[in-house]
Amino acid sequence: MIPSNGDRQVLLEVRNLRKYFPVRKGWGRHGQLKAVDDVSFSIFKGETLGLVGESGCGKTTVGRTIVRLYRPTGGQVLINGTDIAGMTQRQLKPFRRTMQIIFQDPYASLNPRMTVGDIVGEPLDIHGLAKGTARQRMIYDLLESVGLSEEHASRYPHEFSGGQRQRIGIARSLALHPDLIICDEPISALDVSIQAQVINLLDDLQREKGLTYLFIAHDLSMVQHISHRIGVMYLGCLVEVAGSRRLYHKPLHPYTQALLSAIPIPDPDASAQSRRIILEGDVPTPIDPPPGCPFCSRCPYVMDICRKERPPMLESEPDHFVACHLVNGPAAAGEPGSAS
Ligand code: SF4
């Protein structure tokens, strides 16, 4: 499944991406933790694709596998049409300039023994892009572009707040003028009052520099704010992809409906009228999951076919992709939300 969107140019195309981790299941027995299992999507130039799902659904592994912090078990990762999934580290080097990652934890992701100037300048050094005063000027410009100043360059990470540290991480990610930035839960470790500032900064940078984002998060309301389209993951699989507004107003997959119903509504009247969907049971283990729909053990609309056949991702409505037998199959009698 590759979502289309008119004539817009695709920057990143992920095809049937899989990332399995080996696990020991007892004496001499080994299994596989299927963190990402056959995930496909595209991101257009200048677009933000939000990737959401509960903790452990595989969204962070998708991001890390795309930038090759993990080697994919299978599938393709095409950047501007070139597949980087099977490349060696040496072959990857020119592509590392194209894509960067902002990590979740601004405390752990910055080396406490390096000055901020050296942290931001490190990518320039690795790629041999600038030296001396030219390097210094570039570092100052990068700091200014994220709302910091020249005098911050000589300080150390522990002298900064969480929000400022994340700004340093963003400045570092911009050093090589990337096209694509993987934002791996960049605001979840920050105070709520700071989160909006970082989101607004990412928004401004996207407009100024034409950046493309894969924005990974579990906070659905924040993802809606920044994303043009949103993909929903469950148990290593992508289950729904649609435009941000459309997904929030007309979710089709039963899991997305449950996720959205859990978002608190500030208006007490609207909140009283909304119906919270409580899912029974726990998320199953991704170790050797059974065939069929990954959501079948918790879905209120489960059918026999759901336990046997994995539903393919299909374009259920224009630019709205869903992997669900009920939505796409002959059993569909409207939307899942209206099923008894
Ligand atoms: Fe539920 Fe079946 Fe759809 Fe899966 S395929 S979400 S189990 S109805």
Image (cartoon, grey):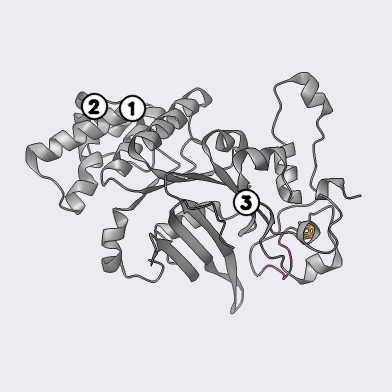
Q: Is residue 251 above or below residue 165?
A: below
Please tell me whether mark 1 sits on a helix, a strand or a loop.
loop
Q: Is residue 105 above or below residue 67?
A: above
- Mark 2 belongs to which amino acid? His
Q: Identify the residue under disc 2.
A: 152
Q: Quadrant of ligand 1?
A: bottom right
Q: Identify the residue under disc 3.
A: 319
Q: Identify the residue under disc 1.
A: 160
Quadrant of the rendering where the N terminus is positioned? bottom right
Q: Residue at x 39, y 71 (%)?
A: 86
Of the two numbered discs 2 and 1 on the same chain, state the one appearing first in sequence: 2
* CA distance for labels 3 and 2: 45 Å
| Left or right, residue 261 beside residue 230 | right
For disc 2, the neighbor class at 10 Å (few under 14, some 14 to 19, many from 20) is: some
Residue 199 sits inside the magenta stretch: no
Q: Which sits in the foreground, 302 or 33?
A: 302
Asked if the residue under mark 1 is in contact with the one under mark 2, i.e. CB atoms within 8 Å, the reply is yes
| Left or right, residue 167 beside residue 39 | left
The span picked out in magenta is 289-294
Q: Report the mark closest to the observer, 3 or 2.
A: 3
| Left or right, residue 128 beside residue 302 | left
> x and y percent of residue 73 in the render?
49, 71
Of the two numbered discs 3 and 1 on the same chain, state the one appearing first in sequence: 1
Residue extending furthest toward the bottom = 28
* CA distance for labels 2 and 1: 9 Å
User: Residue 236 falls in which quadrant of the image?
Assistant: bottom right
Q: Residue at x 43, y 53 (%)?
A: 9
> x and y percent of residue 167 in the render?
35, 32
- Mark 3 belongs to which amino acid? Asp
